[in-house]
Image (cartoon, grey):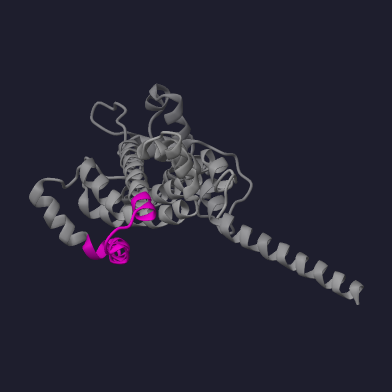
């Protein structure tokens, strides 16, 4: 009987491993597809069946960061010889493109500016949402607040409506006060949108930190604010890291507000990448290159916080 049970457990474990591997392949397939397309020549991006083995090129990234104009005829040899090596790489791919402008000078595309806007807005809004959410959650967790349940539900209710539902009223209000197409406007929106999530997540983490930690610190002469920064905050780093990752991902990927509230000055990368499809034959390698670079900050941010995400909630001196 024990042997049958042991054999059954082995098959269950094998089935679980197979299911995990299948799920992993399904989740990583789009990332592989985007990454491979970002380094493909344009003529191999849409081949059927897909080209798996190819010589990588950085030409899509060159086209992503430099404004270009399409020509009807190939460039002449003199223009080719005068072009820098990175532009010759694009021309070697069979594309009839030159640097845009009457003076033929290199002009950067809008992607670099949009990428920088995404970093500015996402980092600042995440820092504000996590810091204010942590302080608010600490207040709800440690003090008796009149109407606490109603207040928490009100905070949560701000998360219930999709952004696109309130985008038009917000656009009208922002236009009135002059916050349209500004970094400050997006930062306020993303902070408010992430604040409810931050409060609820951090309250759960702070509730798990024993009050005895702070009481011992207060007995030793610490003030309440000193006990918060020296005792509670280090213990809550796991929750802060997890909350920061989710808030950053939400702000980084947000599309509706960025599309409606911005135009040129403060527009972020998500609305800009689809605009590269254009009305003619789309260059999927450029779109894939922009998407690949867009994935990197989130991956790097999550990687940097991996130690906090994996460590325990507290150091385990006292438990309720």
Q: Was residue 89 drawn as part of the magenta stretch in this picture?
A: no
Principal SS element in the magenta part?
A: helix
The reply to whether residue 114 is visible in this rendering is yes
Position of residue 274 in the picture relative to residue 31 (left or right) = left
Q: Was residue 165 drawn as part of the magenta stretch in this picture?
A: yes
Instruction: Name the residue at the top extreme.
Output: 82
Residue 35, given in percent of the width and then of the height, sits at 53, 46
From which residue to which does the magenta span run? 138-166
Q: Quadrant for residue 70, please give it.
A: top left
Instruction: Name the residue at the bottom extreme.
Output: 1
Looking at the image, which is closer to me, 241 or 178?
241
Instruction: Name the residue at the left extreme.
Output: 176
Determine whether 310 is above or below 8 in the image. Answer: above
Position of residue 265 in the picture relative to residue 317 (left or right) = left
Looking at the image, which is closer to me, 115 or 61?
115
Quarter of the image containing the C terminus? bottom right
Residue 304, given in percent of the width and then of the height, sits at 52, 38
Residue sitting at x 47%, y 49%: 211
Determine whether 21 is above or below 115 in the image. Answer: below
């Amino acid at each position: 009987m024990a042997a049958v049970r042991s054999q059954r457990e082995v098959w269950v474990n094998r089935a679980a491993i197979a299911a995990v591997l299948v799920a992993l392949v399904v989740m990583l397939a789009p990332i592989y597809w985007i990454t491979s397309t970002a380094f493909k020549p344009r003529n191999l991006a849409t081949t059927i069946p897909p080209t798996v083995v190819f010589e990588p090129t950085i030409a899509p990234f060159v086209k992503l960061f430099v404004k270009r104009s399409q020509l009807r005829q190939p460039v002449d040899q003199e223009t080719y010889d005068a072009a820098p090596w990175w532009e010759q790489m694009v021309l070697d791919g069979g594309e009839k493109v030159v640097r845009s402008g009457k003076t033929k000078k290199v002009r950067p595309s809008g992607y670099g500016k949009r990428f920088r806007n995404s970093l500015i807005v996402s980092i600042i809004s995440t820092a504000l949402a996590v810091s204010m959410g942590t302080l608010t959650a600490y207040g709800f967790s440690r003090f008796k607040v009149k109407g606490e349940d109603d207040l928490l539900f009100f905070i949560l209710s701000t998360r219930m409506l999709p952004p696109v539902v309130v985008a038009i009223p917000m656009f009208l209000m922002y236009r009135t006060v002059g916050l349209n197409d500004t970094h400050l406007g997006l930062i306020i929106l993303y902070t408010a949108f992430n604040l409810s999530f931050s409060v609820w997540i951090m309250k759960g983490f702070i509730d798990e930190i024993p009050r005895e930690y702070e009481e011992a610190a207060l007995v030793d002469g610490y003030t309440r604010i000193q006990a918060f920064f020296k005792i509670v905050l280090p213990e809550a780093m796991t929750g802060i890291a997890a909350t920061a990752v989710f808030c950053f991902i939400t702000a980084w990927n947000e599309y509706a507000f960025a599309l409606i509230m911005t135009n040129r000055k403060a527009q972020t990368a998500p609305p800009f990448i689809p605009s590269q499809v254009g009305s003619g034959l789309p260059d999927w390698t450029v779109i894939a290159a922009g998407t690949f670079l867009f994935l990197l900050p989130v991956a790097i941010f999550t990687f940097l916080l991996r130690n906090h995400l994996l460590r325990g909630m507290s150091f385990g001196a006292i438990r309720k």
